[in-house]
Image (cartoon, rainbow, N blue to C red):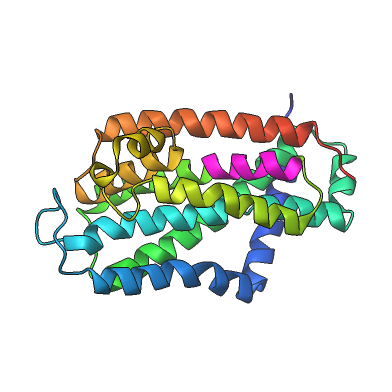
Amino acid sequence: MRIHGTAVYVLWRREMIRYVRAKSRLFGSLAMPVFFLIFLGLGFRRMPVPGMDGGAGYIGFLAPGIIGMTLLFSSSMQGMSVLWDREFGFLKEIMVAPVSRVSLVLGRIAGGATTSMLQGLLIFGASLVMGFRFRGPAALAAGLVFMLLISFTFIGLGLVFASRMKDMQGFGIVMNFVVFPFFFLSGALTPLENFPWIIRALSYADPLTYGVDGLRGALTGTSALPVVVDLAAMAGFSALMLFLGAYFFETSEGV
């Protein structure tokens, strides 16, 4: 099926304009991650974390988890824009446009991934102010790969739910119910080794576990699993969720 680059660009640019103009959305989405960084990072700054060498302490462990949390929430809530467009008729208009629905999906994914990455980078900058240190440019490049894969995975999840729902308030409630278990099971705040075995087993079914662990391994050199395993798992999860999100969006009604 043909991909219309103009349609992808227009939808991406539209999302960028909405993001820049919605100052309250930007600050609201960053408030909770910053609070986590400040209160947990300062409150537990002297707490040693097994495997975190070089005096990194808890902030070295926490920062990748908070970046992952930011990407999780911002990416999954991208589905809200689908419901917003359906509510005001824009979705119906683009659905009948003479372009492939694959192009429409790619435009939404590109816009959502860009805004999520920007928020993740802002939190990364805030973590540097808090004392977080990473291993260098190559580590940052590898971390960006994991950040992008996390964004793709949960944008796909958001599209799946948004394509089958019509109530914006209900979407927010359902997504919060879904994403909080992803977050707490991921090992973003505590090492996986501290979980009981049954919780740890559930953690390994959580895509964010591999995203956070891979991001932590890429940036700090410390991870529970080999970074290659994390990368392979995240690539698989992102491909699956993008496929499901695109499928459900293509088969959804534009009204």
- 160 or 198: nearer the viewer: 198
- Residue 246 position within the rendered picture, expressed as x and y whole percent measured from the top left: 68, 33
Q: Left or right of 212: which side holds 106?
A: right
Tell which residue pokes out farthest to the top in this image: 1
- 157 or 182: nearer the viewer: 182
Q: Which residue corresponds to the image point at 25% horizontal and 35% vertical from the top-left?
A: 225
Q: Quadrant of the N terminus?
A: top right
Residue 239 visible (yes or no):
yes
Q: Left or right of 128: which side holds 202?
A: right
Q: Left or right of 43: which side holds 156?
A: right
Taking the magenta stretch, the answer to whether it contains residue 159 is yes
Q: Which residue corresponds to the image point at 33% horizontal and 48% vertical from the top-left?
A: 187
Residue 145 visible (yes or no):
no
Query: Residues in magenta?
Result: 153-163
- Residue 166 position within the rendered picture, expressed as x and y whole percent measured from the top left: 81, 49
Q: Which residue corresponds to the image point at 56% horizontal and 57% vertical from the top-left?
A: 115
The secondary structure that dominates the magenta segment is helix
- Residue 83 position within the rendered picture, expressed as x and y whole percent measured from the top left: 78, 52
